[in-house]
Image: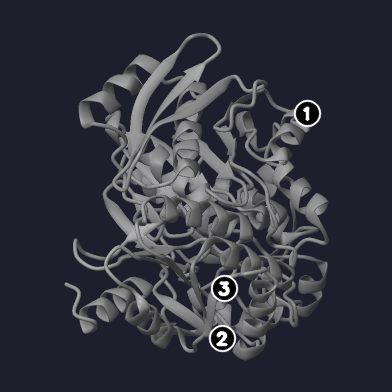
Amino acid sequence: MSGNIPPVVRPEHTTPRSVEILVDELGLRSVGDLRGVEISGLTVMTREVRPGDMFVAVRGANRHGAEFIADAKTNGATAILTDEEGAIIAADQGIPLVIVDSPRAALGEVARWLYRTDVDAPQFFGITGTNGKTSTAYLLEGIIRQLGIVSGLSTTAERHIADETVVSRLTTPEASELHALIARMKEVAVRAVVIEVSAQALTHNRVAGIRFDVAGFTNLSHDHLDDYANMEEYFRAKLAFFTPDFAKRGVVSLDSPWGARVVEESHIPVTTISSLGDPAAHWQVEVTEDNAAYTAFTLTSRDGVSIATREPVIGRHMAANAGLAIVMLIEAGFAPDAIRAALDRDGGIVSYLPGRTEKVSGDRGPNVYVDFGHSPDAFDHTLAAVRRFTTGRTIMVFGADGDRDATKRFDMGRVAAEGCDILVITDHHPRFEDPASIRQELLVGARSVPSGPEIHEVSPPEDAIRFAVSLAREGDSILWAGPGHQNYRDIRGERTVYSARDLARAALADAGWS
């Protein structure tokens, strides 16, 4: 994809390491003269090769990365990591080759070795699940900072390196990029790192070479069936996180039926949490105050530990995410008394969650929220939260991703129609699909609801939000789901500059709402 791609974060100071030693220590096979050959970086993208890098040539959907070794050499690559097929292609390129069965599978261990990310390593916290990963990660990092610990964060939205913020490219970056990011974090004395871990990251070895102190599981619901054959396969991808290779221990929410299966099939010690009153859970989250500014809750264990606090986003599901974050810290060895004291001092969890039920409107006029949710389950929870604090009508605006899981589109339309008074269906990231055909699939689901809402189809989304605002009155709420924090739309492989937050504010201003 071209245009507006955020940069890769690397450590500012890297000591070059001998490829000969790499091959010896990891037991790898090589071709070519390795004497004096050193590497100081690692990348799978030829355009990101820097002088002294090892270029990782992998088999892509259409071509093998080894076909681009000449470009990698021009950019300064000193060695290549590839497979047998790549070695044949690169045989006459005159550059040392390190050969493995699967470069992607080996990438994490090579990156760990190069950047020494396991030496004096920070604590690692990883969160997986369908919904709530990003929110839990931000809340967890917020508490870590309140405890006075220098933190790092890697999510769908952003990377945090102590006080520096960088826009993200993937939910979980490639292993080479992730280890480089951690190495940069270590340079600025980060002692705890929170990482959002997608199913695809586990399937494609993006977190290889990292052993998490605590793995968290939020929930599982219909999503990503373009990448996985069915829900069982999707579940198996997530379950891999709860093995000794990836994590030491886990915290599992029982709020979706899949949570109990994670507990049953986990290969590491786990503790459990519920916000729905499941009696099997060791920890319970009980919402004590639910208003438009925050959600207060009490977290209680069977052992009598209790923490009463609040988190800064509307929605009972956000209290569940916050409870999970706190229990993950306790499982990592943080004292409940210390967590309680920090939260009491600051009046609750201090955290900004970009694009997560984020209010972008002022004190007058309709409330407008932008949200990153893009699954039926996410729609259900977020609409319920918005409706709870809406005195007038609830208006929803959304579209669906192109070239992604199309099997959820009917249910996205249906759930949206069940939860709002006015529905505006528009476009999101069409990618290489026809936007009109995507909208039609959503409309079929929306129109399946008996006595459903008033339904409109408006394209493009710039017009859709203006139209929604034109319908809104004082006391109404607009939920624009899908774009959240993102600052682009993907249209036929091009990242078009686009901000739902800015567009919503401009639409409100044009309508006379300050």
Residue highlighted by disc 1: 264
Percent across and percent down for residue 83 are 77, 65
Upstream in sequence: badge 3 or badge 2: 3
Which residue type carries mark 1?
Glu
> For the residues carrying marks 2 and 1, which lies nearer the camera in this image?
1
Residue lying at the far top of the rendered structure: 303
User: 365 or 440: nearer the eye?
Assistant: 365
Percent across and percent down for residue 410 are 70, 71
Q: Which mark identifies residue 493?
A: 2
Which residue type carries mark 2?
Gly
- What SS does tag 3 mark? loop
> For the residues carrying marks 3 and 1, which lies nearer the camera in this image?
1
**As drawn, 465 above or below 53:** below
Quadrant location, the C terminus:
bottom left
- What SS does tag 2 mark? loop
Q: Whole-Å distance between the Cαs marked 2 and 1?
A: 42 Å
Residue highlighted by disc 3: 45
Camera sees residue 349: yes
